[in-house]
Image: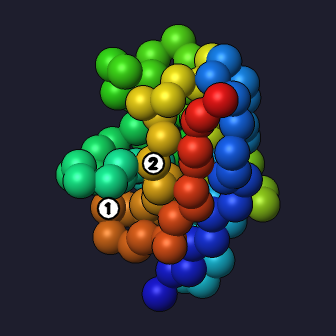
Amino acid sequence: QVQLVESGGGLVQPGGSLRLSCAASGSIFSINVMGWYRQAPGKERELVAGIIRGVRTNYADSVKGRFTISSDNAKNIVYLQMNSLKPEDTARYYCNYGGIYWGKGTLVTVSS
């Protein structure tokens, strides 16, 4: 079993920044494949960014150049640095491990 706990969400004005964290615990030997997803009200959950073995990354087109995913394998933490936030980034952000395990999410609201 793997437990994931997200933090760092909140209310931010358009153009602002937030850094989300996902702390992983349990049956983890190393951070292999992890991702950040988001789900806005009335919409399907979508992939925001993924990281493989702490090196290879991929991003949704809508966040390229604004969001950065990174990991600290020693601490089993994955981060999502979000800059130049837009109202359309408002959603609950979820951490995923190995395509199987999910956290409960952290809410990000971008509004003036």
Q: Which mark is residue 20?
A: none
Q: Answer above or below: position of 39 versus 86.
A: below
Tag of residue 99: 1
Q: Position of residue 112 (x, y in %)?
A: 65, 29
Report the amino acid beneath label 1. Answer: Gly
Q: Distance of mark 2 from mark 1, alpha carbons?
A: 20 Å
| Residue sitting at x 63%, y 63% | 6
Mark 2 crowdedness (10 Å alpha carbons): few <14, some 14-19, many ≥20: many
**Viewer-closest of 11 and 19:** 11
Residue 91: numbered disc: 2
Residue 23 in which image quadrant: bottom right
| 25 up-or-down from 7: above or below | below
| Left or right: 65 as drawn, with respect to 44 | right
Q: Circle 1: is it few (<14), some (14-19), or many (20+) Cα within 10 Å?
A: few
First along the sequence among labels 2 and 1: 2
Q: Residue visible at 49% across and 53% down?
A: 93
Q: Does residue 22 appear anywhere in the picture?
A: yes
Q: Nearer the viewer, residue 1 or 88?
A: 88
Residue at horizontal 70 percent and vertical 36 percent from the top = 12
Q: Judging from the image, what secondary structure is the residue with disc 1 in?
A: loop
Relative placement, left or right, of 52 versus 5 is left
Query: Which is nearer the eye, 5 or 11?
Result: 11
